[in-house]
Amino acid sequence: MKIKVLPVLTAFLLVVLLLLVSCGDKNNPVNNGVFQINSLLPSTAYTGQAVTIIGNNFGGTRSGSYVSLNGEKLDDSSHYSWSNTQVVFFVPQGAVTGDVTLTVNGETSNAKTLTIENQPSSTAPYLDYLSQDIAQPRQTISIYGRNFGDSPKGYVEFNGLRTDDISFWANGRISVKVPDEAVTGKVVVFISSGEATNSAYFKVQSTNQLLDMVRIEPDTFTMGSDNSGLLKEFDCSPAHLVKITKPFWIGKYELTQKQIKKIRSGWNPTVNPRDTGDTKPVINITWVEAVRTCNELSKMENYDTCYTINGNNVTCDFSKNGYRLPTEAEWELACRAGTTGLYAGKLDTLGWYNGNSDNSIHDVGTKSPNAWGLYDMHGNVWEWCWDYYDAMYFNGRPNPDNDPTGPTNSDTGDRVYKGGSYVDGPNSSASAARLGLNLTQSNYNLGFRIVRNAK
C-alpha cells in the first residue's frame, strides 16, 4: 500500500506552528487582544522618571490593579495614570533593573525588562522646576528643565489631563496654560518621541468665577415668527430654521450692577437712585461698553479676549474662549428653551413687563426660570446682542441657517436687542421680538447678559 507522506507531514508542521504561536515568548507575546504588555517607553529610565507601559486590556481604570517592579508592588504614589492600553508610573527611589508586570483583577501580565540608571543620561528629558507651584485654571506657568526638544510636538499633562495649549516650547523651557478641568497633582512633560519626564507637584487654585452660567447644547430651532399681527412691529418674519452647531455657556441672569462694578473697578453706568442696587441688572450701558466689559471680564479670569476694539469699530473672533455678547440666534435659542410659542411659558410667571412690574426694575432671578434654568429672558430689561440690526435680514436666509452672526455691517450702526422690559407690553417680551439701537446709545431699560464658548 502506498502511504501519502506529504499531507501527513504538512498537517504535523501546521500543528507545531500553531503551538509555537500560542506559547509565544514572555517578552514578545503575540497580540491577540489578550491582557499583555507590548513595550515600555522608555525601556531605560532614571529614578523619578515617568515610564509608559503600552499594551492591551489593562482595564479602563486602576480599581485595585497595580504595577510591580522586580516582583515588588509599587506604592500608590508611584501610579500616575491608567487606561485600557497605557499605564504611566514613576520609577521609585532605590529601584534597580528588573522586570515590570501589571496585575489586573488578580491576573499578572507578561514581563518587560526596565533598565534603571541612577542619574538621568545627558539626553534624557528632565523636569527641574515650575515657575510657580500653584495657579488658577487658564493661568500660564513655565516648566524649566532640559532635553524637551526645540519643536512643540510634545504635550503636557496635569495629573493625567493632557493639554496642547502651549504658547512657548524650547529645549529648556515650556510655557503652558493650566487647563480649565485641571486638578491638583503631578505635572509631566511628554516630548515628541513619546518619552516622559519626571514629575513636579502642582496645586490648582480654585477660581472665584463671577458669573453663574448655563450650558446650551447644539440644536436646530425655528427662529423668528410668521405672526404678522402681534409681532409686526418687531421685524421678526419670516420664521426660519436655524442650526447652532457648537455648545456655549450663557449667563443664568442679566449682568448685575454688583458684577459690573467688580469687572470695571467700581464703574456703574446706572445713575438713577431708584434703579440702583447690587442685584438689579445693569442699565444705561451702550453696546460698545458692553463688549468692552466682556473683554475686561475675559482678562480678569484669564481667558482670551474675543473683541478687537478700535473706537466704535469692533470685530469679534468667535473662536476665542473668552466672554462675549450672544449672537441673536444664540440668544433666541436660549430664550425659547425648546418651545415654539410666543413665550417659553406663562409670561406672568417668567418675566416682568408693564402688566405686573409696578413700573420698576426688579432684582434678577425673582421670577421663575425657563426650562433650561435661565432667568429674566422675558422682560425686566432688554438685552444687547452681537448682531447688526437689519429689518429685512431674515428674508432669503438659508434654511437651515448655520450659526448666523447677523449682517456684516449697518448704515445706521444699530445693534440688535431682545427680550422686552418692565415698561413694555407683553408682545415686546416674545421670544422672537427684536429691535435695534445705535451702538453708542444707551437706555434706562436696556442691559445685557454674557456668553462664552463651551467645549
Image (tube, grey):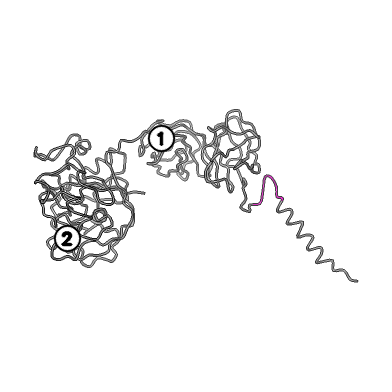
Give the labeled residue for mark 1: 142
- SS for tag 1? strand
Type of amino acid under label 2: Asp
Give the labeled residue for mark 2: 390
Q: In the image as oriented, which residue stretches furthest toward the top?
A: 94
Q: Is residue 129 above or below residue 396?
A: above
User: In front: mark 1 or mark 2?
Assistant: 2
Image quadrant where residue 232 sits: bottom left
**Relative side of 449 to 201, left or right:** left
Which of the pair 218/48 is nearer the observer? 218
Q: Where is residue 442 in the image (x, y as percent from the top left)?
A: 12, 47
Q: Measuring 63% from the left and 33% from the top, which residue is drawn there?
A: 72
**Relative side of 136 to 342, left or right:** right
Type of amino acid under label 1: Ser
**Relative side of 25 to 144, left or right:** right
Image quadrant where residue 363 sits: top left
User: How packed is label 1: few (under 14 Cα within 10 Å), some, or many (20 or more)?
Assistant: some
- SS for tag 2? loop
Q: In this view, does 174 lie above or below 400?
A: above
Magenta region:
23-30
Q: Where is residue 206 in the image (x, y as percent from the top left)?
A: 35, 34
- Please identify the dominant SS of the magenta region: loop
Q: In this view, does 340 lie above or below 294?
A: below
Q: In this view, does 345 lie above or below 110?
A: below
Indicate whether residue 25 is drawn in magenta.
yes
Indicate whether residue 249 is drawn in magenta.
no
